[in-house]
Image (tube, rainbow, N blue to C red):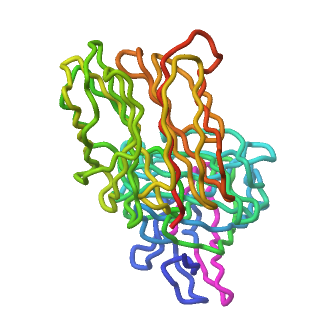
Amino acid sequence: MFIHMLGGGAVRGRAIVVGDPGGGGGSSDGGFVDQPVATTTASGNTTIKGKVKPGSFGKFVYPLATIAAGRQYTFRYTPQFSQLAQQGKLAMVGFGLKNSNDFHIVGLRGDGSTGLNKYKVYGTPPNGWNAQTGHTTSDGGASTNGTQAGPNWIRLVISADGATYKFQTSADGSTWADEYTGATPSPFSNVSGVATFGIALWFNNADAGPFSITIDQFADAAVPDPAGVTLADHGETVNDDTPNYTGLNFGVAASDRVMLAVEAYSSTSSGSSDFTGSTIGGVTATELTEAAASGSVNLALYAASVPTGTSGNIDITISSALATTDTAVSLLRMKGFSATPYAVNQGLTGGTSISRTIDCPAGGVVVAGVYTDGVTGIDWTNVDELDDFLYNSGQRGVSSAARVYASAQTGLSITAAKTGGGSAVSLYLVVASFAPL
């Protein structure tokens, strides 16, 4: 991560007119008496000053960086809105994305009283950047952090594929709260279509008058990718004896990424079927453990090191598979742990819960998966649920879970139980632990 001045490393003490085509100063919609002016001081802070026209919904965006997938952008701002007609009670400060007349702004906006709300405003012609009204707005309610007087910390986190973002706030620049997650930067389908990205201000038409805002601590960094296990995707096949899953999400590529697949199959006809293999992203996967009964139902946990690519296929091979075979996959992304399990366990039962024990080294992770007959909810003990879904028209279910343990565990009991108890069902459980790298 690096922290630097705004405006792409502007010369300290130089004033830049926002909206000046030749000055690299971003874009203004003309809703100001004079175009806002940005100045970077000797201390490295940037201050933007201007005056909103009476009756104008003035807005501008001042460049921070080139926005890109898999990056996060952070800054602290201190507004001076006391000379505005409404003291900034409806003023908005945030991140602006713009290309020609298309724009999207997400940030914090005054609630009309003394508080701040998380807020989005965006538009495309005929209600685009140059229009004063007609934009699409979304008021998300009170933000977790921030005051109208500031200083306020805000952060924009761009997804690995550039199609969505997460907007966060902080009281201290250390602990962050999610305000929006999985948000689409409409009208852009991807941040690759954004030409200008930076700090954006949007004013209410009752907020005429002079203003200034100081921005510091700007940081442009790669999105952290900590060790852990997360849900990547899931899916099902119906009446298919050669199941193949295409285009599943694998998550962010990483040199130490291991894809774990909790794979279940079942058939309405009895038989002597069994898992015989699986590939994940074209890589031959290793079966770590399997819970199997008569052959009509099996549950297995497969693992493959797949360092590249953000999506791919899963192929499953089942011996003596019948045309009535249904399968389901809960696909997990594991990072920062060995692809070879430290310990494994499995089992099956008829009842309302199933438990198995496992050892886990210090700093390691426990991963578990369960198959059920048509159960819509699973309560896990000593692992945290990542996935829970039904397949085969709701007749069968698969759930997966994981937890990282700071200290070593011996004989740790992992339990999957039907939510609310009730009548007995078939339960198949697979469990594995992995040591940290």
Q: Quadrant of residue 393?
A: top left
Which residue does the image show at 40% across and 73% down from the upper left?
21
Q: What residue do we see at 58% from left, 51% from top?
A: 56
In this picture, is 121 found above or below 340? above
414 or 128, nearer to the observer: 414
Magenta-colored stretch includes residue 383: no
Residue at 69% x, 47% y: name it.
90
Q: Position of residue 184 (x, y in %)?
A: 44, 45
Q: Position of residue 66 (x, y in %)?
A: 42, 69
The residue closer to the viewer here, 126 or 238, is 238
Which one is in front, 437 or 104?
437
Q: Relative to 54, say whether 373 is above or below.
A: above
Asked if residue 333 lies left or right of residue 418, the reply is left
Where residue 292 sits: x, y (%)? 38, 29
Q: Is residue 430 left or right of residue 270?
A: right
Residue closest to the eye, 252 or 198 = 252
Residue 315: x %, y % from top left: 23, 40
Name the residue at 29% across, 18% down. 267
Q: Is residue 162 visible?
A: no
Q: Quadrant of the N terminus?
A: bottom right
Occupied quadrant, residue 373: top left
Describe residue 231's horizontal placement relative to residue 84 as left or right: left
The answer to whether any part of residue 94 appears in the image is yes
Residue 46 belongs to magenta span = yes
Q: Residue furthest top?
A: 423
In magenta, the rendered stretch is 37-62
Label tally: 0
